[in-house]
Amino acid sequence: MPHTGSILHGRYAVVSCHVERALDDEVWRRFSRLQERRPGGFAIAALMRPPSSGEDEGLWLERAREAAGRAPLGLHTHWTAPDHARPTGGDPAALVREQGAWLSDVGLDVNLFCGGGWYFDQQVAQAVAELGYADCTATAFRPSYLDADAPHLQLFEPTLLEVATGKRLLELPTTHSIGMLARGALGPFRGPVVHAYFHDTDLLDRRRTAALRVGLAFLGLKRTATDLGELQRGLRPTNTMSFAKSRG
């Protein structure tokens, strides 16, 4: 289990994948193979989009259980459609609660959350905290496609977020994309914890797959590889702030 002091000195790294096409046989085959091989020594957390209406729930559950047997499992909510991550209406927090309850009902051990399209607001944060998850939606960078007023959380290191009276949410920000990971191989990785991410569909592209493998190999040499589950259990950040003050 990571030691808090060591993490604050910047020795650890974790990796997650936004699994959005678990029912695509080729995408799943490539992701499963990568997860089994643990490039750089990393147990790659599967942050999975639940099946939408009309999708094969049984096959999705079978594959989610496979992924959970290899690494931590998380919820990745797409609020509008499988191919449209950010919400366009409705109650985003209610959908998170609904999906979290379903995952619990089917017996999956889920402890992580990442909002699709990096969407995160105060009500969603409250829902995630109520479910007992740690959150990975905050980023150390601001995605270029987001409007200036788009709900988003920007943080550079693990933080305890105060989302309501008596409720705190462990935030484990995502810090590096594939491109940022590859560029980081040329110099030191900064920040107390490196959290690299990619999408399962990236594995359909040979160049992106190669860049990911090389980036993770270098990351594994420069940091101690752990996983989001161990980080969630072993990390106790000293910095705490309210959700409103942490928005970027």
Image: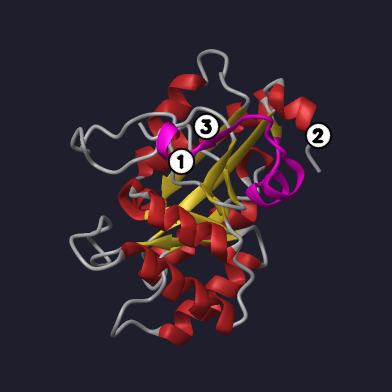
Q: Is residue 30 left or right of residue 235?
A: left
Q: Position of residue 45 (x, y in %)?
A: 58, 53
Q: Secondary structure at mark 2?
A: loop
Specify whether residue 187 is in view.
Answer: yes
Tag shown at residue 52: none
Label 1, label 2: how many angstroms apart (C-alpha)? 26 Å
Would you call the spot at circle 2 few (<14 residues within 10 Å), some (14-19), or many (20 or more)?
Answer: few
**Is 53 in front, or is 29?**
53
The mark that comes first in sequence, 2 or 3, is 2
The reply to whether the magenta stretch includes residue 114 is: no
Q: Is residue 226 left or right of residue 207?
A: right
| Residue mark closest to the camera, 1 vs 2 | 1
Specify whether residue 200 is in view.
Answer: no
Q: Secondary structure at mark 3?
A: helix
The mark that comes first in sequence, 1 or 2, is 2
The mark that comes first in sequence, 3 or 1, is 3
Label 3, label 1: how many angstroms apart (C-alpha)? 36 Å
For disc 2, the marked residue is 3
For disc 3, the marked residue is 214
Would you call the spot at circle 1 few (<14 residues within 10 Å), some (14-19), or many (20 or more)?
Answer: some
Which image quarter is the N terminus in?
A: top right
Tag shown at residue 243: 1
